[in-house]
Image (cartoon, rainbow, N blue to C red):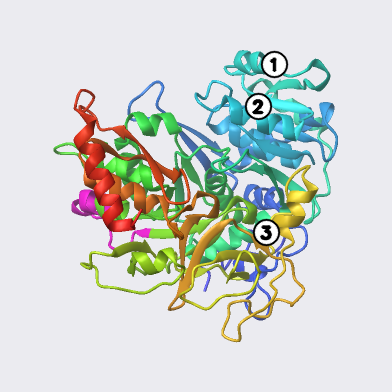
């Protein structure tokens, strides 16, 4: 039963009831007219004076100066900025957000959607190490307008000077738009099949591409997330330092819009410099109710190393829910963080290992609300051959694999042979293919790649398989990942493109990298990369650990060679 919202009116002016988004069989089906903007309008009418988003500004205060915006105030700002967008961009044009993390970014993203344009969440050019990604995404999207802030405008215009004059868009400062501009806003019809925004992929294994996320896809995925993680109570709120151009970061501003909750935001830089800020904010948020956050492996490891509370710090994490969403999820990251913060009330059920992908808007699978993370120990040699054979935890050939639980409601995931498209048996490694209304429409401006990735056909299904009642001729999304089912749970091993093929077998690069780190203290854990050099050889490039800059690398190299040969046979 939905709590906190079940007694509200289900009219267009009342808070959305999750029941209204479910069909008679419990499947997720968005009602007509439900999108991010209509949901925000419901919140304005029902809980307008409540805080919608809070940003902790650490540039002026170590504890974070809170900057807040209510739903009503957000509505005023969206109308104003959307009206200005409509002056310079037409329905369906792309509008890129090149603003720093903060409330203005949230306003710019939602305003671009409200204006009837396609939002393109990117980032301000001063973000170090991402210039190539920004240039690639910007060139692909060809935006008609750029949203920035007064503070970031100079760097944005400097970046635009590198763009050919014929494709150089106008820049609009979000915080420079007067509220009165909203009087000129023209309401737009937002069809569920229209594109809400372009979500650019991470670019880890290829150049970033823009996923066309429709209004139907984003609404469906938010409902799936709320149901899977049990976010039905409006006293549950979000906390995130993840960048807002990232799909996981966007989800943390999306789910409060569904039912009138709120999210607290930080900047990624504030977290990296002092991860204890994240812990402090989680503790503070937990005093208001349950607080949910999300991060990849490295963030939990970094925080366990550098973010532990000081003596006398009043930290309580008993109300925290921690989504961990890397491929693959690291059991070591979960164990390290849990060991560090269990003394501060962290629940054994706090961690939620999850699987997501931009092409499916984001969320695919997670463990149950009351479940603890589970680790499977599999035989390494058999795994490299595609078979999952459980072994004891202390077996020398054991590989630790973390379950991502169950696939979200109204989403289907089959494991197939990527070469033939045939569904494989549980306990066999293959490629996860997805089907559901949360899957994006395709890649922006890339029809051939779209047909390949978004229109795959399962050539044969198993009677005991996972396709459910999906029509035989339905289109499936190729994820590009490797995974398997075992005992009703989904495990994800990593990217197909990252697989190290050597010695006639497929090796998990993360496993090879872990072996290297365990073989020598000279290796900085988490900072190694394994790849194929030939049919029989593997190269591992590893960063030296802190303080090991002058050590002789020869003994470490020999130890790594011996360990990799012994454990992996290459």
- Which range of residues does the magenta coloring cover? 337-351
* Viewer-nearest of discs 3 and 1: 1
Q: Answer yes or no: do the residues labelled 2 and 1 have beta carbons within 8 Å?
A: yes
Q: Residue at x 32, y 62 (%)?
A: 399
Residue 382 is situated, as x and y percent measured from the top left of the image, at 39, 69
209 to 463, vertically: above or below:
above
Can residue 80 be seen from the camera position used here? Answer: no
In the drawing, does residue 39 fall left or right of residue 307? right
Q: Nearer the viewer, residue 458 or 186?
A: 458
Q: CA distance from mark 2 to mark 3?
A: 26 Å
Residue 373 is situated, as x and y percent measured from the top left of the image, at 34, 64
Can residue 83 be seen from the camera position used here? Answer: yes
Q: Quadrant of residue 424?
A: bottom right
Of labels 2 and 3, earlier in sequence is 2
Q: Please tell me whether residue 141 belongs to the stretch shown in magenta.
A: no
> Which residue matches tag 2?
135
Q: CA distance from mark 2 to mark 1?
A: 9 Å
Q: Residue furthest bottom?
A: 463
Q: How many marks?
A: 3
Of labels 3 and 1, earlier in sequence is 1
Q: Residue at x 53, y 78 (%)?
A: 425
Q: Residue at x 41, y 22 (%)?
A: 59
In the drawing, does residue 342 fall left or right of residue 198? left
Q: Nearer the viewer, residue 196 or 359?
A: 359
> Which residue matches tag 1?
162
> Which residue matches tag 3?
439
544 to 172, vertically: above or below:
below
């Amino acid at each position: 039963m939905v709590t906190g919202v079940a007694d509200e009116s289900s009219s267009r002016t009342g808070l959305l009831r999750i029941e209204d988004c479910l069909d008679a069989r419990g499947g997720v089906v968005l009602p007509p007219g439900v999108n991010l903007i209509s949901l925000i309008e419901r919140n304005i009418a029902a809980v307008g004076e409540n805080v919608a988003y809070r940003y902790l500004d650490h540039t002026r205060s170590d504890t974070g100066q809170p900057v807040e915006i209510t739903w009503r105030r957000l509505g005023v700002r969206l109308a104003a900025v959307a009206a200005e967008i409509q002056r310079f961009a037409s329905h369906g044009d792309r509008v890129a957000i090149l603003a720093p993390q903060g409330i203005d970014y949230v306003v710019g993203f939602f305003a671009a959607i409200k204006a009837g344009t396609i939002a393109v969440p990117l980032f301000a050019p001063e973000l170090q190490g991402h210039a190539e990604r920004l240039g690639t995404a910007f060139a692909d999207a060809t935006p008609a307008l750029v949203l920035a802030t007064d503070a970031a405008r100079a760097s944005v215009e400097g970046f635009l000077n590198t763009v050919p004059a014929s494709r150089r868009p106008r820049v609009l400062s979000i915080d420079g738009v007067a509220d009165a501009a909203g009087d000129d806003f023209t309401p737009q019809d937002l069809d569920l099949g229209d594109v809400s925004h372009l979500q650019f992929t991470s670019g880890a294994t290829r150049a970033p591409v823009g996923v066309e996320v429709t209004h139907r896809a984003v609404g469906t995925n938010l409902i799936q997330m709320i149901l899977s993680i049990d976010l039905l109570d409006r006293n549950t709120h979000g906390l995130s330092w993840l960048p807002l151009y990232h799909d996981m970061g966007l989800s943390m501003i999306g789910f409060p819009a569904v039912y009138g909750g709120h999210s607290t935001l930080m900047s990624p830089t504030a977290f990296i410099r002092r991860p204890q800020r994240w812990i402090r904010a989680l503790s503070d948020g937990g005093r208001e109710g349950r607080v949910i956050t999300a991060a990849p492996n490295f963030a939990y490891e970094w925080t366990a190393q550098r973010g532990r509370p000081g003596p006398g710090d009043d930290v309580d994490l008993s109300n925290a829910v921690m989504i961990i969403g890397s491929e693959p999820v690291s059991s070591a990251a979960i164990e390290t963080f849990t060991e560090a913060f269990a003394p501060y009330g962290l629940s054994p059920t706090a961690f939620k290992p999850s699987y997501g992908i931009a092409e499916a808007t984001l969320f695919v699978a997670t463990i149950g609300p009351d479940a603890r993370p589970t680790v499977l120990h599999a035989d390494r040699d058999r795994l490299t051959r595609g078979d999952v054979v459980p072994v004891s935890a202390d077996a020398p050939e054991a590989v630790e694999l973390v379950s991502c639980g169950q696939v979200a409601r109204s989403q289907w995931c089959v494991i197939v042979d990527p070469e033939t498209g045939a569904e494989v048996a549980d306990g066999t490694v293959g490629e996860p293919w997805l089907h559901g209304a949360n899957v994006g429409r395709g890649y922006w401006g890339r029809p051939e790649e779209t047909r390949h990735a978004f229109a795959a056909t399962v050539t044969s299904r198993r009677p005991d398989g996972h396709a459910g009642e999906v029509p035989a001729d339905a289109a499936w999304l190729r994820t590009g990942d490797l995974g398997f089912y075992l005992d009703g749970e989904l495990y994800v091993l990593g990217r197909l493109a990252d697989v190290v093929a050597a010695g006639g077998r497929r090796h998990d690069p993360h496993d090879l990298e872990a072996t290297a780190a365990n073989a020598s203290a000279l290796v900085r854990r988490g900072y190694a990369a394994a790849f194929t050099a030939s049919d029989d050889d593997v190269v591992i490039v590893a960063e030296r650990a802190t303080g090991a800059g002058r050590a002789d690398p020869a003994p470490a190299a020999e130890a790594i060679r011996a360990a990799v040969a012994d454990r992996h046979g290459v």
